[in-house]
Image (tube, grey):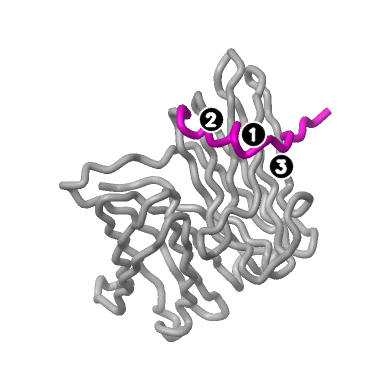
Amino acid sequence: MRTAMAVGALVLLVGLVAVGQFHYAFYYDLSGGQDLEINLINTMPWANDVGIEVHDAYGGLIWDSYGTVDSYATVYVRLGDEIPPGSTYWGVVTVDSEERLVIGLEYFSDDLLISVDTVYSDIPVLDPAEPFWLGTYYTQVGSAETAFIVMNPWASTATCSISAYDSDGNWLETWDFILGPYEAEYVWLGDYIASSGMSWGFLDVSMEDVSLILALEYTGRGCSGLEIDNVTEYYF
């Protein structure tokens, strides 16, 4: 039998987050017929205390839960069972854990599974004196379109700069963001980069002080017409 994660009191969750060694984050969307199932997999041969927080696009806390995952066990949360749909109910989910987790994500649209992703890298605490970078692929080829979502998974303000380059390495556009605690920003690349047979390339994200994460929504791709990927690993 699959085990669901129990809802806990906020005061206990705060205590857990304060002592949790590992901090994970990823994207969710409950704003337009979408849903997310989160599977928390304990990689250790002993029990693991875990806490979840879900924030809206402006960083507000809209749901939280805590619990213990047995050794090598998996518990799940279907966000749509806990949170009603809302136009601002999209952005970042954070998970704090005493031990390392593997997190399996199943994204749904109109109750149909559209995308599966796995998060296994926790979010690092940065050296304020050094920049940090992550990067990903975008495509605006044919019927394909890409949106990116940049998210702040921390309780402090974060800044970043995101640049788009075409397949030949030519700079196309740069966006600068200041994100409040747990805030997210959504950018539809079609508003800035025209579709064409050669319209694909590199999104490069630079950040300082606080590490951020990125998610991509690729439309016009795959059997469902929508693919969702989290970018939580850093290249420099």
User: Which of the two marks, 1 or 3, is nearer to us in this view?
Assistant: 1
* Magenta-highlighted residues: 1-20
Coordinates of residue 162 in the picture (x, y in percent): 32, 67
Q: For the image shown, how many numbered marks are present on the structure?
A: 3
The answer to whether residue 2 is magenta is yes
Q: Quadrant of residue 86?
A: bottom right
Give the distance between the C-alpha atoms of the residues marked 1 and 3, in whole angstroms. Answer: 11 Å
Residue 230 vs 167, above or below: the answer is above
Residues marked 2 and 1 touching at CB (< 8 Å): yes
Could you tell me the amino acid type at mark 2?
Leu
Could you tell me the amino acid type at mark 3?
Val
The residue that mark 1 highlights is 66
**Sequence-first tag of 3 and 2:** 2
Residue 70 vs 128, above or below: the answer is above
**Sequence-first tag of 2 and 1:** 2
The residue that mark 2 highlights is 16
* Left or right, 109 with reference to 1: left
Give the distance between the C-alpha atoms of the residues marked 3 and 2, in whole angstroms. Answer: 18 Å
Q: Residue at x 50, y 34 (%)?
A: 17
The answer to whether residue 230 is magenta is no
The residue that mark 3 highlights is 77
Residues marked 1 and 3 touching at CB (< 8 Å): no
Q: Residue furthest right?
A: 1
Who is closer to the viewer here, 180 or 44?
180
Give the distance between the C-alpha atoms of the residues marked 2 and 1, in whole angstroms. Answer: 8 Å
> Dot 3 lies on which element?
strand
